[in-house]
Image (tube, rainbow, N blue to C red):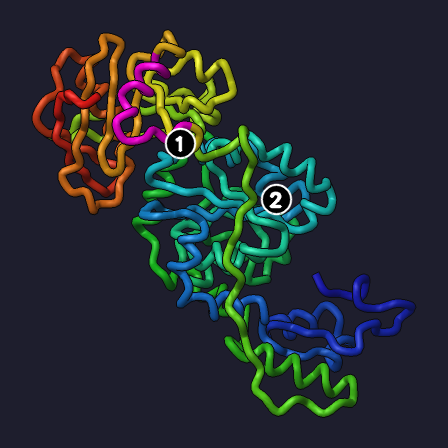
Amino acid sequence: MLGPATLLRDGTLVPGTLVLSHPEQLDRLRLSCPEAVEAALIAGDPSHDRILAGLPWRDRYRDHLETGHRKLVMVSSTWGPGSLLGSRPELLNRLLAELPVDEYRVALALHPNTWHGHGHHQVRSWLAEAERAGLRVLPPRQGWQAALVAADHVIGDHGSVTAYGASLGTHTMLGAFPDTEMDPFSPIARFGRSATRLRADLPLLPQILADAADHKPDRFAAFTDRLNSEPGGSGRILRETFYRLLDLPEPEHPVRTLPADVPIPYRRGWPDTTDHAPLWSTVQEEGSRLRVRRHPAESVTKERLFLDRPHLVTHTDETQARWSEAACLLLCGPDSESPGEGASWALLRARLSDHPRAHLAVAADGPDCLLVDRDGTRIRLVADDPGHRHDPTAAASAYWHLWVEGEAPEGSLLVLLGEHESSFTVRASNEE
């Protein structure tokens, strides 16, 4: 809160110019520290302006976050014990465990003070399990604005990033909110009293979907409209002020407001990569269609084992014996093995023999999926629409479900991943 303790020293005002983003702040300043009113300048919010300038770049931002057709959940945490990670450190792993990886991508933006206060290495160590489960961690100072533009859902706390997300009309919920630390008359406190809070005692995904169904883009406008009184004009006002204070002539060219930089998340290196993290896969029959949902095994602990009859899908690159030895479906290629034409079946048989507990070896072959069982049976799941963007290895879980139920899979497989349907034709293969 702006007041004498932060603005005055020995009764003298410290700042020569005090930049505010909205007249509402001036009203509160007049009550808390009237001595500072004459130094106040209402100049809008340059950071918010960059977010607005990036709105046309949403698709490009999503590409850099490898979102694809998935919904992007942007998690934001400011710093301190009342922040989301400070008060609910388990929330990240719960989100990753409960949100199917083929339907949701989760990205995280932490306040720079968290990184600088604890150290880069410590923060990455804390987040290592979540990163391996698919979390995209953004650097301290770059990417969060773009990720907000790209997001479908925002989950945050009392930090400004959460409010920025709400100002865009994006569905926003609170994972934490320290009401007692806020000025009760401030817009952020009023926003905190209005936004829905994620309950720890209930499954997360149903809460998110239920709140999103009732969401309207102008839901928080009464509070978020007070973030920036000069949308798109902050740079002009600030530049005029800086050059006036420096007693220099202002450049004649207009001020440029650049969109936020593209988000480039941190990547864990081989072999601790997120590209082939082990997955618990479940299959539900919906009429003639088979819905496949996959969840990161790293996050679905015994305490969170909510899945119905899951089977484990593990890549041959997996370095942890607890996952590689428990694999039901063994995923081969493409990074370390990349089978060539005519060698795929031999490779699958060889990898299956290296993992005696696995039941099927699986590999993508373009849009198709290849499977080999321990009897040497070779199956090709042929994509009926080769141009359709899908993960063919998800069809292996659908095949497996019918196989273990005693239904000899034949004909067509209709596979659902989220809202997307893919059709495959089951063919016994004589290829060598």
Q: Is 21 situated above or below 274?
A: below
Task: Between residue 55 and residue 30, name the one nearer to us.
Answer: 55
The quarter of the picture where residue 124 lies is top right
- Position of 62 with respect to 156 (left or right) is left
Q: Which residues are magenta?
A: 337-352
Q: Is 29 situated above or below 156?
A: below
Q: Amino acid at mark 1?
A: Glu
Q: Residue furthest right?
A: 10
**CB-based contact (under 8 Å), mark 2 and mark 1:** no
Task: Between residue 142 and residue 375, name the one nearer to us.
Answer: 375
Q: Residues within 10 Å of mark 2 (few under 14, many from 20)?
A: many
Disc 2: which residue: 83
Disc 1: which residue: 98
Can you give x and y, in whole percent of width and height, for residue 310 in the image? Answer: 32, 19
Q: Amino acid at mark 2?
A: Ser
The quarter of the picture where residue 248 lies is bottom right
